[in-house]
Image (cartoon, rainbow, N blue to C red):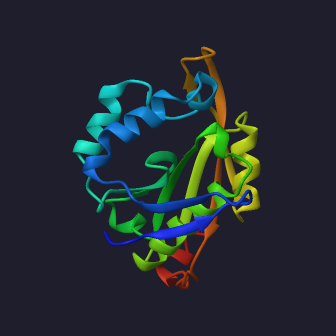
Amino acid sequence: MEYEKMVVLRDGIQVKIRPLRKEDEELLVKFFKNLDVSDVMFLMDDVRNEEVVREWVRGLDYNWVLPLVAVHNAEIVGDIALKFSGRERRKHVAELTVTIARDFRGKGLGAALNEAAEDIARQKGIRKLKYETPISNVRAVISAELWGYTKEAVLEKEFYSPVDKLLHDVVVLTKFIQPVEVEETPEVIEEFL
């Protein structure tokens, strides 16, 4: 996958956004290891487990998951992943996950990564992006809303956090990035409505 973009953050720092590569394995392991427990408590996978991260990198397949990383001074400082559906009826939807290093928050990096993910998603024919996070992850919810996502649903007690040992409600935020054609309801189905 060819994509590379230099971005200047609000504080003047430059970062390069590009796809994760297999040779980034050690950098990605280090990125996740350096995050605080509170930074990873709402992620779906245990990214502080080195083997989980190594399996991701070794199994890179851009047809299923396209991770983009933000690199500054040869260090990964942010990550966003587009997860594509293998189902024909959901091929227009991709799911996002986002993680930003604490020192790079509030500087526009999340918005820049989201913009890059949207650009690539459009190129791949994706029409709708979906972002799920526990509703108690207030910073992530507010960020997604600032990026133009809207709350579509709340799933009760959907996420278990091994950090606080609680079940959390999950908010589903979505954004249409391309027009969606809606076909008229066939007459056969209308008689059941």
Left or right: residue 96 versus residue 56 is right
When asked about the image quadrant of residue 167, the answer is top right
Residue 163 in the image: state x and y as whole percent: 58, 17
Left or right: residue 141 versus residue 32 is right
Residue 1 in the image: state x and y as whole percent: 31, 69
Q: Nearer the viewer, residue 31 or 79?
A: 31
Q: Nearer the viewer, residue 138 or 128?
A: 138
Q: Residue at x 77, y 49 (%)?
A: 142
Residue 157 in the image: state x and y as whole percent: 63, 29
Q: Residue at x 43, y 49 (%)?
A: 74
Q: Is residue 159 above or below residue 4?
A: above
Q: Is residue 50 above or below residue 97?
A: above
Q: Is residue 111 above or below residue 46?
A: below
Outermost residue on the top side: it is: 165
Q: Residue at x 31, y 59 (%)?
A: 86
Residue 60 in the image: state x and y as whole percent: 26, 51
Position of the C terminus, as image quadrant, is bottom right
Q: Is residue 192 above or below residue 139?
A: below
> Looking at the image, how many numbered discs can be counted on the residues?
0
Q: Residue at x 65, y 37 (%)?
A: 102
Left or right: residue 30 versus residue 57 is right
Residue 73 in view in this figure: yes
Residue 155 in view in this figure: no
